[in-house]
Amino acid sequence: MEFLVNDLSLEDQSPDIPTFREAIERLIGMRNIIHRFECELYCHKNIANVRVTGDLVFSEMVQKLTWDQEQAVMQWISRNGGPFWDDTRVHNPDEYLECCNGKVVVTDSAIREAACRLLSGESDYHLVSLISPLWAFTPISVTWIPDNDRPQTVDVANYWMEEPLEAMLQKAPPRITSWEELARHSEMRFSNLRFFRECFDPLPGYPLGERDFRQILKRFQVLDELKSGFGTDGQRTPKGQEIYQKYFTGEKAWFSDSSNTEKHKFRKDLHFSDPTKIGNQSLFCPWHGKIKGTLQLRIHFSWPVRADEPLYVVYVGPKITKR
């Protein structure tokens, strides 16, 4: 679960120092709640230069806070602080997006990044705003207007008070704290997949990052839905075809085949023992899902996916085809 500071809620929103102090105190409180649930609150690297009121930018206003507030904020927004969402941004800063019925352009902002993540299928992105009449509402409905294509709209959950934020986090699924828990959870949750007994074995010994296991679960969910996306005739349903087009095709696909060079060079490594076969028979599984988090991980699985054959997950671990 990821939270982004709504940088637009900073711009010209604090008429005086007491108002700014109150807003920052609430923001720090929400960040502490997020940390207590072992999640992260990301800000923009340039947050220090956002104009908050009159001629004063955020870093100048921070100097007018109490000593404790100033220390907490500066440790966060300094170049050695963070984390910063623009380190791993997925959206093009030139794409046009708007919210509030077209009244506010959100291009190159945290709202844009959260909307882009949600549009790409990542469901756990939320916004945290400084308290302000302009941003005291949820969800924030964002419209993306691509060139020569139909507009797409997505709702982004927004939090500006501690109580609703904490209530939501308390209801969220329990955090997975080990690779073993991830394996058990996956085998129970994704009933359309067949996990090789050793498929998670490469993971112990590596640090467990929330972004990593969240992305793994999202890839499993897509595979699970693809396997269930067949009709009685054995062909993909419209939903199954939509999943295939969205996640298995295009430059930003979550899943892809290995290159011919990789298949040749790593052919032995891309064979995995098949528990349903007798002897030394194995499955050749160059198709994989990509995880781009703290670690560079891959999920290898059997392909093609057919209605009358099991979909095996054969490997979850570091990238096999490293050059």
Image (cartoon, rainbow, N blue to C red):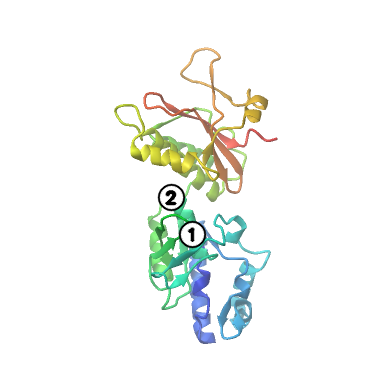
Image coords of residue 24 (percent x, y)? 52, 76
Residue kind at label 2, given as amino acid type: Pro
Q: Nearer the viewer, residue 271 or 287?
A: 287
The residue wearing badge 2 is 174
Residue kind at label 1, given as amino acid type: Ala
Q: Residues within 10 Å of mark 2 (few under 14, many from 20)?
A: few
The residue furthest front is 148
Mark 1 secondary-structure assignment: helix
Image coords of residue 30 (percent x, y)? 48, 68
Residue 205 visible in the picture: yes
> Looking at the image, is 9 positioned above or below residue 267?
below
The answer to whether residue 13 is left or right of residue 308 is right
Q: CA distance from mark 1 to mark 2?
A: 22 Å
The residue furthest top is 279
Image coords of residue 212 (percent x, y)? 55, 46
> Looking at the image, is 41 positioned above or below residue 262?
below
Residue at image coords 59%, 38%:
204
Residue at image coords 43%, 35%:
187
Mark 2 secondary-structure assignment: loop
Q: Give the quarter of the image for residue 308.
A: top left
**Quadrant placement of the C terminus:** top right
The residue wearing badge 1 is 114
Image coords of residue 307 (percent x, y)? 37, 27
Q: Residue 269's mark? A: none
Residue at image coords 49%, 47%:
214
Q: Nearer the viewer, residue 79 or 56?
A: 56
